[in-house]
Amino acid sequence: MHTGRLAILGALHEEIADLLAAMDPGAVIHRVAMRDFHVGTLWGTPCVIALSRIGKVAAAATASIVIQEFQASRVIFTGLAGGLHPDVAVGDVVVASALMQHDMDARPLFPQHEIPLLGREDFAADPVLSARLLDSARQFASGHAGLPAGQGARRPKVHHGLIATGDVFVNDNDYAHRLRQRLPEALCLEMEGGAMAQVCYEFGVPFAVLRVISDQADHAAKTDFTDFLVNLARVYTAGVLAPLLQSGAFRQA
């Protein structure tokens, strides 16, 4: 399986658009399970890039395909997330130390959040991949002007910690508050990473997750998320990943 190919996944087209545009002209598109898998070279690194679509099932299916069909030896999931922890603001970057599924609840058969039959609540991201993402994200943040004027202009901060995944787009203050009380260590919320992490864990494939905070999971989340997706998402994704891939950090198996 150790071919050295890196898989990069995103749930929405805008999150991976600049990556697809930057692939070498010789990239080949393979259609599998209603998904397009772009196989080629990105900034000198052999890659397969795919749109997973939204949600845990979609992410798990896509992760399984890149591992089994395209022999990906490492997987990175990138995209937007809703901020949950009070220290995390819109425009910040979060690199996962671990991921869990906040909507997994098989009580009384298993404890809340525990993945049935695996005996664990969370999945640790690969420390080497995550450290490289953190370094690149910090370099990006140090030279990034932050959000446009009028949107709380400030330089983005980079965080490393727990990311919570669920099949819920959280745009409700009360729901977000309950999650903060239940998961005080969780930095942000998204809808794919925890499922991808479980698949990679079961296949023994290293993974990392890079998320950019687009909203605060509150009543304004839909508008804030949409604006950020259209105007800023691709700037962050390419800005963090381009220098990392160009450096050759992911070319070794």
Image (cartoon, rainbow, N blue to C red):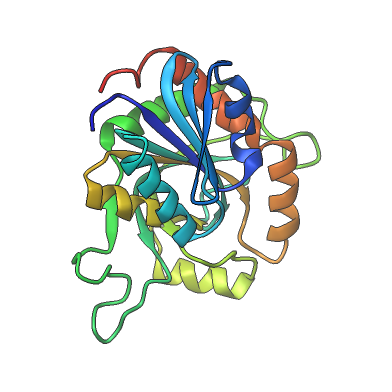
Q: Closest to the observer: 149 or 165? A: 165
Left or right side of 63 for 27: right
Q: Residue furthest right?
A: 150
Q: As displayed, is residue 127 above or below residue 108?
A: above
Up-down relation of residue 187 to residue 50 (above or below) = below
Q: Seen in the image, is 93 located left or right of residue 99?
A: right
**Residue 155 seen anywhere in this rendered image of the structure:** no
Quarter of the picture containing the C terminus is top left
Residue plotted at (59% across, 75% down) = 174
71 and 142: which is toward the camera: 71
Quadrant in the picture for the N terminus: top left
Residue 229 lies left or right of residue 48; in this view the side is: right
For residue 2, above or below residue 64? above
Image position, residue 207 (x, y; %): 33, 40
Q: Point out residue 138 in the picture as x, y percentages from the top left corner.
A: 47, 26
Is 60 in front, or is 217? 60
Q: Position of residue 147 (x, y in %)?
A: 70, 35
Most extreme residue toward the bottom is: 108
Q: Is residue 64 visible?
A: yes
Q: Position of residue 246 (x, y in %)?
A: 46, 13
Q: Residue at x 50, y 74 (%)?
A: 178
In the picture, measured across the screen, residue 198 lies left or right of residue 211, that is left
Determine which quarter of the picture holds residue 151.
top right
Of 20 and 149, the residue lying toward us: 20
- Residue in the image at 24% along x and 84% along y: 109
Tell me: residue 17, above or below residue 139.
below
The quadrant holding residue 29 is top right
Residue occupying the point 66% across, 31% down: 146
Total numbered labels placed on residues in the image: 0
